[in-house]
Amino acid sequence: MINKLENLIKKITLDQQKRLAVNSLDCQCNLDNAIASYKIKKKYTYIDIGNSGRYMVVNDTGEIFGIKGYGVIHRGHSFGTLDTIDDYFWGDYRAIKKDSSCKNSVKLVRKICLEHLGLSEG
């Protein structure tokens, strides 16, 4: 499980920093605050981005959930399992499930940013 958590942490950090670069917000301070870390507890593993709690992983199953508050799991915000981390883009405030039109992560980041601004590629 530790290896899978390390892969998730690397993916979250990389996606967060890619999004910052696409939006021209990639100063060193922002990049430093986009680094993910984890803390393994008895029942859950806590995943933080910078100093903020963001996700919780159920240690028994590997399921990934968002949080309501630090240490409070939000079962309504499910983001797959540690085996399906590549099915999601982790660079936004909340993970976004990838669709088949965005196999390239840079293309996905661009699409998400344009949608957020209400624009389309053209």
Image (cartoon, helix red, strand yellow):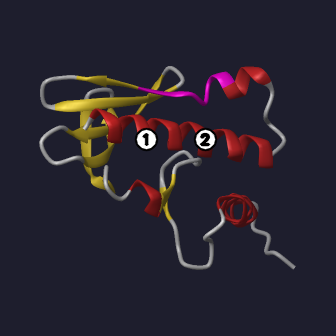
Q: Secondary structure at mark 1?
A: helix
The residue indicated by pointer 1 is 7
* Residue 55 in view (yes/no): no
Which stretch appears magenta?
32-37
Foreground: 27 or 85?
A: 85
Residue at position x 79%, y 46% in the image: 23
The amino acid pointed to by label 2 is Leu
Residue 6, quarter of the rendered image: top left
Q: Secondary structure at mark 2?
A: helix
The residue indicated by pointer 2 is 14
Tell me where residue 96 appears, x and y as whole percent. Answer: 50, 59
User: From the viewer's perspective, is residue 4 above or below residue 33?
Assistant: below
Residue 23 part of the magenta segment: no
Tell me where residue 54 appears, x and y as whole percent. Answer: 42, 36
> Dots 1 and 2: beta carbons under 8 Å?
no
Residue at position x 72%, y 65% in the image: 107
Tell me where residue 30 appears, x and y as whole percent. Answer: 71, 27
